[in-house]
Image (cartoon, rainbow, N blue to C red):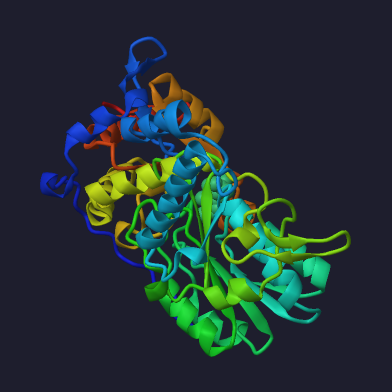
Amino acid sequence: MTITTLPAKPTTAIDPTRLLPAALRDDFPILQQTVHGDRPLVFLDNAASTQRPRQVIEVLRRVYERDYANVHRGIHTLSERSTEQYEDAREKAREFIGAQHAREIIFTSGTTASINLVARSWGDANVKAGDEILVTTMEHHSNLVPWQQLAERSGAVLKHVPITDDGLLILDTLDTLLTERTKIVAVASVSNVLGTINPVREIARRAHAAGAIVLVDAAQSVPHLPTNVQEFGADFLAFSGHKMLGPTGIGVLYGREELLDAMPPFLGGGSMINRVWDDRFTPAELPAKFEAGTPPIAPAIALGAAIDRLKLIGLDAVARHEHELVRYAYDRLREIEGLRILGPPPDHRAGLVSFTLPEPHAHDVAQLLDQQGIAVRAGHHCTWPLHDRLGITASTRASFYLYNTPAEVDLLVEVVAKIRDRFRPQGRKRRQ
Ligand code: PLP
């Protein structure tokens, strides 16, 4: 078994040519404020949810002020306008992730809803007692609990791909973990705690060779890295609008057409039917089959605007910018005595860094950072089993997006260093 401990590059200088223009930040009204008196807001909680630019807020306002009506139903001007924009957004989402057909794009309320849809609809129809479901130790509860529930309903066995101490998947274990009983492999493309970028394409290749299908939880990668479902070899892929400049309440499930076609509807109600009689119904075609009831119309249209914005900036440029920030943060945070960074070195991670200090507790670190205007996340980040594996109960996470700056990283490091100093055992204060 190969367990790689990778060396980190010992460099802390920022390369300004790899950063996005600072003026981008002006598009985000919420970032222009101070908190706790005169502290400029430093928003480093983007893995939980990002902020929205004016362009997205404007589209939401325009829809509600001018175009809004229910979609696919009314034969009137506003309904036609809303329907056209709603379907345009589907096309934008399709193109953004490289799907072949717009009917492979199902609008849901977010990643959690997308994964639950697959676990219920595909899972209940295809997974039987004794079958196996393969996840990894680093999954968010959203990509774990639905599979635990499916295992409980069906009598299937849930297995986990383990990780190294550095937070990398131990891929050699796939040799034994993938069997002819494996029905699905559900894996995050980027860990929301470790930042690890997982080799999804390789995992999909091996899963397919074993006869299993692959679901990619792309909540932390679609907003940050160029994504192509066909290159990934993903059979299903899920992501959320609110983590990529869009509104809450909207997300996407991509599914390969043959799979979606063969799946029974999950929720029943309006829109998802072709014909209804007293005692039965026939389902609608894709994608309506999986969009029962009134969908999140304005949020979907605004997600389209968020995608436009990201395309204009360029996902390659976003990834470069975040990589530069995370490398800088990683190198500088590592200099703080006793601070433990979770996950691999920067070359294997997306734009976030989680860490622990010997003292104080992660929640206190987050609270002390907040007093200086810095918003981070603390706790188990919906990855309880991962925290168990790492032998910790909580961590503090700083997560970056296209509007963050090196100066914000500097402030983060400076305040964390001061917190560390303040909570050092008596008599061991560091001299400045
Ligand atoms: N998967 C991962 C990796 C996540 O980071 C998150 C949210 O933090 C989710 C799933 C769930 O996303 P949502 O709450 O938008 O459904």
Residue 64, compared with residue 114, is above or below; it is: above
Looking at the image, the residue that sits furthest to the right is: 279
Looking at the image, the residue that sits furthest to the left is: 17
The residue nearer to you, when weighing 220 against 416, is 220
Which of the 4 image quadrants contains residue 212?
Answer: bottom right
Looking at the image, the residue that sits furthest to the top is: 37
Which of the 4 image quadrants contains residue 325?
Answer: top left
- For the point 12% across and 44% down, which residue is it? 16
- Count of picture labels: 0
Residue 350, compared with residue 102, is above or below; it is: above
Residue 316, compared with residue 203, is above or below; it is: above
Residue 344 in the image: state x and y as whole percent: 39, 60
From the viewer's perspective, tell me whether residue 256 is left or right of residue 269. Answer: left
| Quadrant of the frame with the C terminus | top left
Residue 275 in view here: yes
Which of the 4 image quadrants contains residue 156?
Answer: bottom right
Residue 341 in view here: no
Residue 363 in the image: state x and y as whole percent: 55, 32
Residue 144, compared with residue 374, is above or below; it is: below
- For the point 42% across and 50% down, which residue is it? 89
Residue 361 in the image: state x and y as whole percent: 55, 34
- For the point 48% across and 54% down, which residue is it? 219
The residue nearer to you, when weighing 271 against 4, is 271
The residue nearer to you, when weighing 427 against 278, is 278
From the viewer's perspective, tell me whether residue 85 is left or right of residue 383. Answer: left
Residue 48 in the image: state x and y as whole percent: 49, 41
- For the point 54% across and 67% down, which residue is it? 187
